[in-house]
Amino acid sequence: MSKTIALAGTFDSKGKEFLFVKDLIESLGFQTLTIHTGVFEAAFQADISNAQVVEAAGYKIEKIVADKDRAIATEALAKGMEFLLPKLYEEGKFDGVLSFGGTGGTSIVTPGMRALPIGVPKVMVSTVASGNTQPYIGTSDIIMMPSIVDVAGLNEISTTIFSNAVFAITGMLDFKDKTKNDQSEHRKPLIAASMFGVTTPCINHAKSYLEDRGYEVLIFHATGIGGQTMENLILEGFFDGVLDITTTEWVDEIVGGVLNAGPHRLEAAATSRTPQVVSVGALDMVNFGPYSSVPDEFYDRKFYKHNPTVTLMRTTPEENRKVAEVIATKLNQAQESTALLLPLKGVSGLDAEGQDFYGPEEDQVLFDTLRENINPNNVQLLELDMNINDPQFAEAAAEKLIQLIEQKKGEK
């Protein structure tokens, strides 16, 4: 049975271009599900009309046309796609999604793409693909291709780009069933782990320890988007356990660094009741870009130039107190299967005795605040007299996670 590609876009202003793509897809033996995301009448009959798209978000296309407000129209169509596209996928109407557009078209279709599960092929050919794509991609696996020229007309360059995009998504769908994939039959329990450069030894050792015991470990770099992606996948039920050793993103959220993961970091495991072992990795540092980019208000602080583009700033006792209060609040949301491990001899490679950020006073405030605020009925608090990167600490964290996972299995 041939696969179906959802082809979404503004069929009113770019009808000729989308018909070219539609014909090419179908000439390769694939079916199309055309979704009109423009405001006005489509140049060809679409399978899903713009009226259906906006109705999914509670709007009426007649009013949108009459109002002639581009911002409202974009918002209605984007919300409609966010609701409608995953619904159509769940109904088995398509296997992958392809779109082309400028800033408006990209903003309309990508919310729907982001709402699809990880692994569903999603290709967005866009005039903004070479800039900051984070607002469009978020934590999803959307593939964005630069359109080179505007999506306006068929010419030597545009038809080449359009064709390559078609070949890309048809290749994904075609080869998906031709490769040997028996992972579902021999699936290992999955563990999410958070890592930073200064906690790498801990995570690498814990990873080996867990893999030797039959687990598969997926590592997320705690750079803001890494933490957000990990949280989203935890909520989607990807993982059997979480080894959240590196919670440094909370420092940037509170102090004003560049690698914050937003206000919902550390909530997903509690919400999804996923067993988690959490620690205080890299809470000794705030992250900035080049030294010249550090805000003037921090001129008298202790810094470590990690490389020409990354500058680290040592946290103060007061900043550690604020971070600890927030982390305790987040962890206390858990009703079960949660442990917090404190490495009493340093929270990172830079916070070991003799290193640049070694700070027993700052760490003491961090640990004391956590002790005072953690609810022992919800969270197991374990203290180890070692640095976070000591192999024994990594093994203790991994073993505790295994215990929580096995305990949860036994309760089912």
Image (cartoon, rainbow, N blue to C red):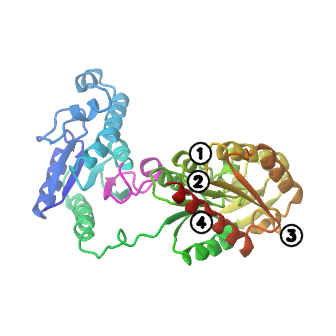
Q: Earlier in the sequence, mark 3 or mark 4?
A: 3
The circle on residue 262 is 1
Percent x, y for residue 28?
A: 13, 64
Percent x, y for residue 393?
A: 73, 69
Q: Which residue is mark 3?
A: 353
Separation (CA) of disc 1 from disc 3? 31 Å
What span is in magenta? Answer: 116-141
For discs 2 and 4, the disc positioned in front in the rendered view: 4
Circles 3 and 4, Cβ within 8 Å, touching? The answer is no
Q: Is residue 117 left or right of residue 238?
A: left
Percent x, y for residue 169?
A: 26, 62
> Is residue 136 on the magenta stretch?
yes
Q: Earlier in the sequence, mark 2 or mark 3?
A: 2
Residue 147 seen from this side? no
For discs 1 and 4, the disc positioned in front in the rendered view: 4
Separation (CA) of disc 1 from disc 4? 28 Å
Tag 3 secondary structure = loop
Circles 1 and 4, Cβ within 8 Å, touching? The answer is no
Overall secondary structure of the magenta section: loop
Separation (CA) of disc 2 from disc 3? 28 Å
Q: Earlier in the sequence, mark 1 or mark 3?
A: 1
Q: Residues within 10 Å of mark 4 (few under 14, many from 20)?
A: many
Q: Amino acid at mark 2?
A: Gly
Circles 1 and 3, Cβ within 8 Å, touching? The answer is no
Residue 279 seen from this side? yes
Q: Earlier in the sequence, mark 2 or mark 4?
A: 2
Query: Going 66% across and 70% down the picture, which residue do you hit?
Result: 200
Circles 2 and 1, Cβ within 8 Å, touching? The answer is yes
Tag 1 secondary structure = loop
Query: Going 27% across and 30% down the picture, which residue do you hit?
Result: 55
Q: Quadrant of residue 343?
A: bottom right
